[in-house]
Image (spheres, helix red, strand yellow):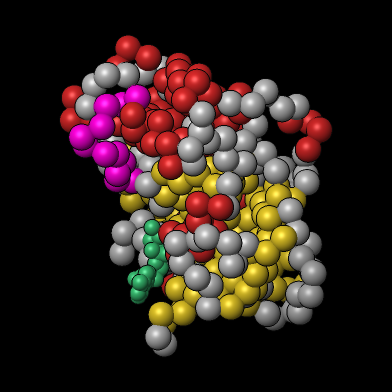
Amino acid sequence: MSAVKDPAQKQDQTLVSLRNLNKHYGDFTAVDNISLDIKEGEFLTFLGSSGSGKSTTLSMLAGFETPSSGEILVDGRSLVNVPPHKRDIGMVFQRYSLFPHLSVRDNIAFPLDIRKVDPKERERRVDAMLKLVQLDSFAHRRPSQLSGGQQQRVAIARALVYEPRILLMDEPLGALDKKLREDLQDELRQLHRRLGITIVYVTHDQEEAMRLSQRIAIFSHGRIVGLGSGYDLYQNPPNAFVASFLGNSNFLRLQASGNGAATFEGHDLSIRLTAGIASGQSLMLMVRPEKAQALSTQQAEQLPLAAGWNQVPAKVTEVLFLGESQTCSVVTQGGTAMTVKALSSTGMPLAAGDTVLVRWAATDACVYTEWNESDLGKPSAHP
Ligand code: ADP
Ligand code: MG
């Protein structure tokens, strides 16, 4: 592997550009006009439900699928007519696709053999890779003599051995159990740091995306509907779909009564200033369960509502103890269900049937002027 590169040197330089990329299968649009710049050295994840177009987009980048239209540029040069093995791209799939009759060493060496790399250089690189994925002592085993996690490490070593600039990974940990998956996620993050390589990773698992990536592109119906760091996408989702896809959210239907003011089920609220709101307009408010508080009437009397905060009355339907945290489900007078989450250490001395006031700070809630009703429910990873 080439020398460790200085990550600061190349920050923010675009390596790959997808421009108006489309893929149609007959009448069906699998990838719908995607444009995206991938930065040199970044770890970017495509996150979305099954069927949202992640693998198709990755396959076009790898060269296994031809775009129906649009461009793929690397360093400003078009890749569309470059065959997969000339793209300087490594690929790892969910199924390890190792050669069963070859040893670990020969599996890793395979890409060098087909590129006719000099035997001495070949041995040097394979040794370095075996060390990198910590399989030195397994070099002579066959894939069937390895655990799933070890096999996937061989697949990663095989993809990295010819030193590609870009590594594509399509749900590479999907077949592994949770503990092993988390170990390999940590390894992958460290590997990325050490090598400074550009990684484009596909998963339907939001926690995995959060753990691994510097940026996440959220896919829905062949489009990218959110792009940013996990932190920004979670704290400030650009739309209701991203809000409900990443984490849990409470959605409240409001009526604007001026900029910075609205009503919810007849209660006056203050909201974030949002461009282009007309009085009387319908709005959707989103507040995360951990940003909301549920106070008993007694507690509320002792704690006057701070400026910039809102409160609405509700009735507790269920309190759940989850170890580290507790959730309290409530329903408002108008029938809106909400969930409030608190750390167990803070305590939520409430029970089903209690009357509460649900409070949140206006600055902690997002306001949307447009949404699809279907975006408000929790989409499942595998519909
Ligand atoms: P993801 O990886 O996000 O689960 P894919 O990119 O594999 O989704 O697929 C996106 C959509 O395109 C799916 O609805 C899938 O059925 C469809 N699709 C993928 N490949 C083909 C194909 N070869 N022919 C027809 N439809 C396809
Ligand atoms: Mg896929």
Above-or-below relation of 74 to 23: above
Can residue 285 be spotted in the picture? Answer: no
Provide the residue span drawn in magenta.
94-105
Of 280 and 133, the residue lying toward us: 133
Counting every numbered tag in the picture gives: 0
157 left or right, relative to 7: left
Above-or-below relation of 208 to 153: below
**Residue, x 40% and y 85% (percent of image)?**
26
Above-or-below relation of 295 to 73: above
Q: Quadrant of ligand 2?
A: bottom left
Of 245 and 351, the residue lying toward us: 245
302 inside magenta stretch? no
Of 374 and 264, the residue lying toward us: 374
Above-or-below relation of 288 to 107: below
Examine the residues drawn in magenta and state their main secondary structure.
loop
138 left or right, relative to 169: left
Of 66 and 17, the residue lying toward us: 66
**Residue, x 41% and y 87% (percent of image)?**
27
Image coordinates of residue 8 in percent, x first then y, are 79, 31
